[in-house]
């Protein structure tokens, strides 16, 4: 971990974070697109399964959930993983900005 006692080191780290976010942007956008398309497909498949099932509403919901529970799990996992990384980078950038402001006040 870098030492952030000088504004130059904080600015350098903020620049690295900016570059990292820029590199991950297309990955994040692609993962989001795949996930939201797959999510719509899963919702459609669940609706079809629900309408095709027999029994009470609760039983039909259970059948539909069972049949579609694993649909799009890979797309969702990839999207959530990239989203988590982006959130961490955003948090680090926010901390860096706070450190920089505190150093300028001194």
Image (cartoon, rainbow, N blue to C red):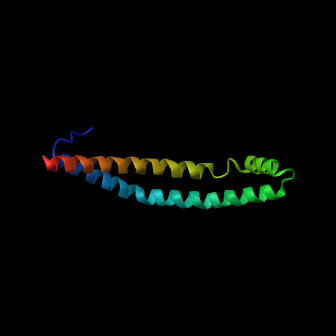
Q: Which residue is pictured at 36% across the width and 48% down the height?
A: 91
At horizontal 52% and vertical 58% (from top left) the residue drawn is 32
Q: From the image, which quarter does the N terminus lie in?
A: top left
x, y percent for residue 13: 25, 48
Give the x, y percent position of residue 83. 47, 51
The residue drawn where x is 77% and y is 47% is 62
Q: Is residue 55 above or below residue 40?
A: above
Give the answer, above or below, for where 9 lies relative to 46. above
**In the image: residue 6, left or right of residue 13:** left
Instruction: State the image coordinates of residue 57 (x, y, percent, origin top left).
Output: 81, 52
Foreground residue among 49 and 29: 49
**Residue 89 vertical placement versus 45 (above, below):** above
Q: For this view, does 100 lie left or right of residue 49?
A: left
Q: Residue at x 31, y 51 (%)?
A: 17
**Residue furthest left as drawn:** 106
Residue that protrudes farthest toward the right in the picture: 54
- Please name whichever residue, 54 or 32, is drawn nearer the observer in this view of the structure: 54
Q: Position of residue 21 (x, y in %)?
A: 36, 55
| Badge count | 0
Q: Nearer the viewer, residue 102 or 73?
A: 102
**Residue 2 position by quadrant:** top left
């Amino acid at each position: 971990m870098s030492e952030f006692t000088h504004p130059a080191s904080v600015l350098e780290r903020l620049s690295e974070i900016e570059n990292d976010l820029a590199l991950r942007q297309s990955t994040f956008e692609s993962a989001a697109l795949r996930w939201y398309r797959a999510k719509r497909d899963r919702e459609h498949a669940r609706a079809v399964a629900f309408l095709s099932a027999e029994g009470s509403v609760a039983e039909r919901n259970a059948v539909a959930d069972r049949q579609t529970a694993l649909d799009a799990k890979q797309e969702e996992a990839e999207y959530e993983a990239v989203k988590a990384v982006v959130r961490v980078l955003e948090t680090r950038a926010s901390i860096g900005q706070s450190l920089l402001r505190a150093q300028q006040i001194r």
